[in-house]
Amino acid sequence: MFGTILAALDGSPKSEAALGTAIDEAKAWKASLHAVYVIETGLHSSIPLDNTWEVIFGLLESQGKEALKAAEAKAAAAGVSLTSHIAQGHAGSEILKMAKQVGADLVVVGSHGKSQVDRLLLGSVSSYVVKYSTITTLVVRS
């Protein structure tokens, strides 16, 4: 039985499918549902902080807020309340940190995110979460 579910979102079709599954699970288990969007800053630690980075960060934050707002609407349409969170850092680490923070007993992630190039360069976020998670993790492949 699951009491608290965390869905990891990145705005990709795979994360949309993961959100749908998380909503279904929340309804089935009468669980609370949380969603997290992580602004990946782990890659950019060596980039000097200047106005350009601030603009890029602002754009990424705006995309995250839009994705979470859409997730809240989708959950509400299904009769499920969703609490949204934005984090920044290494996506896999931040997802696991958020799972611990909200007391999640299920994490739902898409099989891969927005970019296949990111997957080649960084490794899959979902693979990281599966490898290091201490709670049940569901990878949605649809």
Image (cartoon, rainbow, N blue to C red):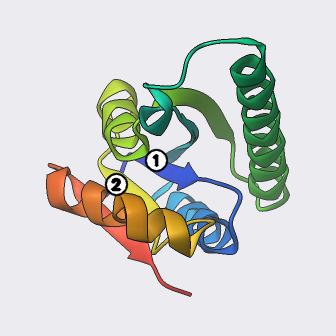
Q: Nearer the viewer, residue 101 or 40?
A: 40
How far from the left and from the top, in percent, is residue 85? 60, 30
Q: Which residue is mark 2?
A: 106
* Relative to 8, residue 4 above or below: above
Q: Residue at x 34, y 54 (%)?
A: 106
Which numbered circle lies on residue 6? 1
* Relative to 8, residue 139 above or below: below
Secondary-structure class at tag 1:
strand
How far from the left and from the top, in percent, is residue 51? 77, 13
N-terminal label among 1 and 2: 1
Q: Does the rendering let one see residue 70?
A: yes
* Relative to 80, residue 78 above or below: below
Q: Residue furthest bottom?
A: 142
Q: Does the rendering let one see residue 28?
A: no
Q: Residue at x 29, y 48 (%)?
A: 105
Q: Residue at x 80, y 50 (%)?
A: 76
Q: Nearer the viewer, residue 68 or 11?
A: 11
Secondary-structure class at tag 2:
strand
